[in-house]
Image (spheres, rainbow, N blue to C red):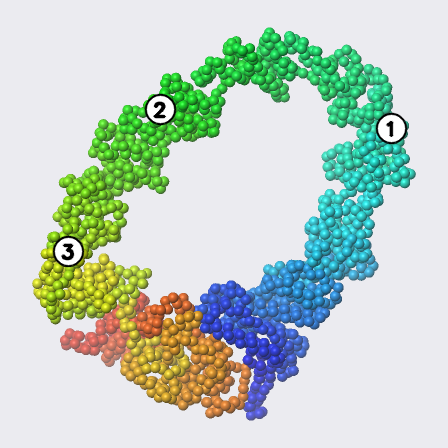
Amino acid sequence: MYESLLFLNSVEEIHLKSSNSALGGNLVTSYVVQVEMTEDAKHSRKIFNEEVKRLSRALKDRNILLKDVGVTETSYELITKDSDGQRDTWQIIQRFGFEDPSCVPEILNDAYSRGDIGLLPRCGVAHLKSTTRKGVKQNRRLFCFLPLPIHIHFPSHVNGHFALDYETRRNLWKDENGGYNTVWNNCLMKHIIAPCYCSLLLKNRDFHIAEGPITNSILSQYSSLLPDLSTKDGVYMTILCKAIYERIGKKNLAVLPVRWPGNEGRHLWIGPGGMDEPTWKMWIDMGWDGSLGTNGILGYFDSLHIQIAEPPESSAPGYRSMSLMVASSVKTEQKKRKRAEIVRDILVASGFLLINCPMSIAGNFESAQVKVQAVSPDAVLSFYASYAQPHGLCRLQGLPKPLEETLFKDVETLTLVVAYCTGCDNYKNRLFGLPFLLTADGYLRCFEQEAIKYEPYFNEIVPHIQDQFFNYQIFHTLKLAVTTDIQLSKAFTVEEFAKALPALLPPEMFKAREEPVRIETLKAILKEKDLRWLARLWKFLYSCQKKLETEGNSRKASESMKNIVLPLLDWCLLPVNFRQQEYLFPIQKSRGVIKLPEMVVVQRTLISCLQKIGIPQPLFTYFPVDTDSIHMYYQILGNMDDASSVVLALAEVLKHGAIETKLSSHECGELCRYLVKSLEIWKGTADSINTIKQLPIFTTMYDKQVALSNSRVYVIPSNIPKIDMESWTAVQGIIFLKSSEELSELLKFLGCVSLNETEVYCSYIFQHFELLSQPGQKVHLGYVKDNLLSRLTTKPYYKEKPEHQREREQECNALLESLQTLAFIPTDDGSYVCASEFFDNQNEVFELMQEPVDFPPAPFDSPEWNDFLKKCGMISAVNQTMFCDYACQVEQKAQEVIDEKLTKQSRTLVKHLFSRDDINNTSFMNKVKSIRFVEPYTLGTFNRDLHDGCRMKNRSGQNMFIAFGNSITPENCDLVWTVQNILPTLDVPYYQRSEIYANLDIQEKPKPENVAKHIQRLCTKWAPEPHKLRPYAEFMALVLRKCYTLLKSMVRDDTSGILTDLKNTACIFDLQHCLLVQPRQVVLRWKPDKEIIPYLIRSPDELGEFIEFLKLLGSTLEKATIDQYSMVLEMIHDKVKDNELHANEKEAVCKATRSFFKLLKQSKEPVALQRELFLPGTDGKLHRSSEIIVNNDFLLGQRVEQFDKTFLIDLKEECDMSISEFELELLIKKLPASYQPEFLTSVVRELMDESFTEEDLNFVKMMQRKLQSDEMKEGIMRIAWHGVKENEKENERRITEAIEGLQNIQFIGVNIIRTFLVHKGSRINGSERNRHFHIKVELVDGKKCCKIFVGSKATESYNEHAMRIFYYKISQAVSYFTENIIPQSSFSYLEHIIQCNEHMIDQLLEMHGIKPIQCLQDLQRQFRPNPGQFVPLNLHHLLKQDILLLKIGDYVALEIVDPADNISTFTEDETTGSPGDDDGGIERSSMDPTYILVKIIGILDEDKGPTIATYKIEDGNGVKTVSAALLYAFHRTVTNVKDVDAILEADDTKRNPTVTLDEAKCEIRQTLLDTWKLREDIRKKFIKRLLLRWHPDKNLDNSQTATEATKYIFEVIDKLSKGISLEEQLPYTTHSSSTDSSSNYAGAYYSYISQRARQHQRAQQCFQENYARNRENVDERRRRDFIKSFSVVSRNPQPGEGRRWLRQAEWDLKSVINDGLDGNWPSPEWACFKCYQAAKKALKGAQYARDSNSVTGKELNDMVGIFQTPELRDWVRELQRLLTSPSYMQYPTDHHQPMIPHEDFSDEIARRAQVLSQNVTDWCKRYIG
């Protein structure tokens, strides 16, 4: 109770009173709780409530949809205090509406529009800011404006207009199926309460901002406001909690506190999504003095204490939880602090945003799928990466600077931060731009990509660049490795050293010098006497070598050493002993410094030789013994085992002068042998050839030692013929060395050329072949042909090695290449040409196609030279280009004349083509296939006579040669010879045939489209004169059958369009008649006697196997079609034109016409023709059907003998058809409109002579009465409905309207009728006649009317045939004036009912199976309903509860009975109801009131006001006087519609303007004052109407006013009941209830009123929705439609009336039981009568409950027809059979004498009747409910 006032807007104090017996039972206040608010708070709440009322009213009036309700929110502070001295301060946030219309599910919009939900999108939260209650656990609860018994683990109270369960109204709605109530609660939690609670968080945040520094306890209290997602408060609370976090994330609400850098105790605020514009603005307002960063900067939850592990106290600092290593030495003052604290302080001081909230809140965000961040190495790295950004938050500035001047102060602190950052997996990739770089000079810097530092090793060899090296401790903390972290650190390599060296040693003295440098110069520069720098340098080089070997362990040490020293090759850093002096040689000459081994016997001569020459040797003076430096130095030197080093040493000696020492031949030989043995080692040495050539150690063929420099040396074979070789021996500058196998490799390396036979000929002899004499030429050519070429082209008898084979083949190819370019064949003019200039005279194609001069001359034309010349390049094969040229030559010549030679050339080329190896070359075949060089196949005699094919002719008139492309093999000649070229028989390899044919585009099988075209060409040629085919008929039939067979197998349907042209071609050959016809002229399996030769024939017998194929072409099966017969008529017309038909043509025309109309008669639907229709006329010609006249009226036809139009022939006479004029007219109407002939009756008009006198004839009266009778109208409607389908409801409306057309038909009796005919306004002479009747249609007042004139002698002189014509004409008129609603198939029924008596219409239609339709009864009712009809239940919401002054003539509802009147309304001990109560125990089915429709015919006491006035009414049973309390006016409330007045009258449809509370009170006061003057029963009805009028559930748009008005009603009732003046106050007041607690009205009564109000509201909403959906038809729904709804409504159930009849039935049965208590009835017939009446009344009650508009039936069997329950029907039928009828049980007249009813009915019958009647009554009771 203490918290009940939090969300009540109009109650500010509650008093709890109890009865005190000591004080005489008076009420004593035992507890008081009240609310305190500031004026501003009250004002804020008032504005909010007014806006809620406005929006609620708009919702109720449907001015807005639920999803369009905008957001209204208010915040205020509220204090609750009670009589116990407790005082609480609350922060209240209330909210109404949706931010986003799309968040409202469609199911809610639909439910709201239907009225299933009347709840409002309203909520509130209440947060306890402070309290005086101590030690009391504050339980949070859910509210539905008042507390619900639902406790929640939520930081605040939550209020919402929830959907509660129907039973207890104490829990939120639970529905496993997800109904709209569940969706409503979910939507309320997610989209209204969650935003409301977020506003509460922001409110608290702003409070803490204003208060200043935040203590840890305050911060803990604030953190507790963020809800815990792990609590188990149910699905709805989980949805709410998740929605809160989702909204915080989506809106990025700055509700998370972060530590303020440099400001102890103060906090900034940030959202989970980081910084944005509103957050920056808030920071500035809070006094933020840092830089303004960019949007998106995140805050991070502080989890450092979890991530950073502290080292054991007994051990040095080690690894943290992330396996991060930190510094091993920590300052004393830092040891007292935890590592996490140190890192946290540094981060905050640096400007890092640490969120000061528990990590559990971060978990809640993650559970709600809202991304938040906890502090992590990754985040710290990202933060410090903003160091150099212009808008970053990092406060570390001014780098580089000494470390002690930064925030880190010392290496140890920096090491801790860096060690934490290494917990990021990719921290090394993100160090660039971070201020973590500490160099060897003690400065803190940023990592930069352009300034990568060296690892901290060997920095002493470059003392001038210490800022380029890492600090050792930071380097190892970052776990850097130069091999993998090349982007962060780099090794101090030899290359880097070489770059730094010029700043240490002068390059002009130590680099790129040919002369060595004295060691004393280096000592002077470095100021080191012992030159330790030199040893450290070589150790550095050694370490680099080891690294290189580790990286590539497969390399040799010498190779890695070479790579190491490569950048220093030009620098003089190598100590050497040369010519007895200490020098520094360039390192690149290190291999030329030879460490000679001790003197050994084997190498003594060689060592002595080298010492004599004076090579350089190593110097070890400045290296410590057995150190890495001397080891590296020793590796870089040369030795005897490395011959290349010896060569370099010799070159170095030669650079400084010639060799002065004379060497012996033995020493020269030893050195040559050393060089030969080690040739592979030293031959790659730079300038080695020039060096060795300068050595005087080589022996010539004259045994002289010489150097080989500046000379050319050759060694040639000795077996080459010597003839004419003198020209090459006198070449100068050549040294001929003695051939030596031992020195051959060395000489070859030094450039001495050794030539083989082929090289001699190709490089020397053939190059100057013209220098040889003719005998010499023949000798050398013979040697080459018979020896050299034969040896190279002949495989040896032994197995040849592959390399030798390749060498031989290469040598052979070289020789052949030279021969092919060698001009050695003499010509007549004395010149020489190559063999490639001639063609092979042994080739058959060349022999036919080339000239004699193109072949080789003698002696080269002999066979023994043929193979040699082919190898030399003579043209011996026909290539693709040559073949195409030859084929084109044949094609060109064939255009002129074709002789025997050309034919032979063609055949030879074709034969050669299929013997070629490249026959499958696609590009070659594409060229060949289009050349016309092939001799075609010779056609047979019959083929040529039928068609000479598709061949082209040359200028001589001969058939041209053909191409392979698109030609076909000869076996398919008969199928395509008119459209394709036929190839001769080809000698093609069988296994290659398919591929070759495909490449040449040769068809083995014809294509169906070509076969179809072939048929078309053949048949088109012979179709005009098929009789000339007689000599070739058999062959023609055979060819076509072959074609049909192929097409039948290849064309299954005509989707490809291949057969399209054949369908219009005369391609069907009738061998018997020698006739070619089109496929559509053929009927398959047709009888011969039905043929119309030659226009329409049966299929020939020989084509029986092609039936399916012919059907594809358009032939019909077994029956000809209408279109085929119209085709016959068209063909005859095209043949005859406008001439008269001869006898055979007339016979064919009559046969076709008769068959055409027969098929037309068989067709049930209109036909569509594909061609023009021609019909025979009486003039013996064929005419277009639209140009001919049909005589459809025999009588008129006799009167137009002088008519100049052509008539259709008499089908009866000419075509032997039995057809009436009427049938012919119906048949013609089946034709398309453009094809229909004109009817005589439409061309000629019959007019009536006006000289007549009207007479009163009984026959005319009878016909007029019959036509206007209800039976006739009903009969016509039944016939019309007989053809209406269920889904054609629009036709039903048209039928009912069309029936009114019968009023426009009038029968007139006259004395005489004389008529004449008119055509186009001219009277036809001789057409005057006397008639017995005449039908005339004319316009009267703009409306068509039909006058049927009947002569006075008509009925007397009419025979049966004439009367049938008369009724037929009348039926036509009726059909016309009822808009042809009678289907053509049902027209005969109309004739029948017009002829018969009107009382027999129903029986006649029943006999024809045309049953009555239930809706027909509804539509025949009067437009305006009769008084006394029941008001449908679904229209009860339209009854206006206001007490208005009614008007005479109004239709109003009269209350007959209301179950509410039977509920006790003055029960003192019942609980008082409340306007907000939803409880009610009265079901609608049993508590609906009953109203009937009455009409106001008079007003009494009108001057006394609407309440006192009484009215005279007509209720269908007479005139009565009733009170105004029983009468209800009808009205509709329509919203969102512009044309409201289009539905009801203006005063009823206009919305009542919003009524103020004062106006409502005034109306209530006056009504109740007037009511209290009336009888109590009348007074109660007025009170009921007032409660319904002002019930809040019926006034959703003005609920506040309605609530207050309801309170006022009860207050006034209470005062008037107690006789208290309305101006006096009641002796006590309770503000906690909407209704006075002393009110006499019981809870059950008001609950019933509440239920009825909600029913009315839902019905009204449904009406408005339906109206809005159908507003386009507003013009048709006037007030008359509203009144009409009483009679044409589909159903009008009245369960109340049904129960009334049921009660009487039950009493009747009780009477039966009382009469036969002992099992015997004194009067069994009377008991049976009561059973019959009870069953009948029960069934009538069930009919009322089902539909009061359909209460019909006099007998039981009739009454049970509308119910489909089999058992009920069985009981009723048995009862009806048992008891027969009521008169049978009452009167003796229905019994055989002398029996009476008492004697015919026994006790057994009575007992059975009682059981059956009881069964029927029980069933009806269950049905009614």
Rendered position, 1700 above or below 914: below
Mark 3 or mark 2, earlier in chain: 2
Mark 2 or mark 1, earlier in chain: 1
Mark 2 or 1, closer to the camera: 2
Q: Is residue 1222 visible?
A: no
Give the image location of residue 170, x and y in percent: 52, 74
Residue at the spot of label 2: 954
Between 1013 and 596, the one nearer to me in the picture = 1013
Give the image location of residue 739, x and y in percent: 72, 13
Residue type, mark 2 in image: Asn
Rendered position, 1694 above or below 381: below
Give the image location of residue 1021, x and y in percent: 27, 32
Helix, strand or loop at label 2? It is loop
Residue type, mark 3 in image: Asp
The answer for how far apart the CA atoms under marks 3 and 2 are is: 73 Å
Between 708 and 114, the one nearer to me in the picture = 708
Q: Residue at x 24, y 65 (%)?
A: 1277
Q: Residue at x 14, y 47 (%)?
A: 1178
Q: Contact (CB < 8 A) between labels 3 and 2?
A: no
Residue type, mark 1 in image: Phe
The picture quadrant where one finds residue 1808 is bottom left
Q: Which mark is residue 1193?
A: 3
Give the image location of residue 411, x and y in percent: 80, 54
Q: Which mark is residue 578?
A: 1
Between 27 and 348, the one nearer to me in the picture = 348
Mark 3 Cα shell of 10 Å, populated few (<14), some (14-19), many (≥20):
some
Q: Residue at x 82, y 50 (%)?
A: 441
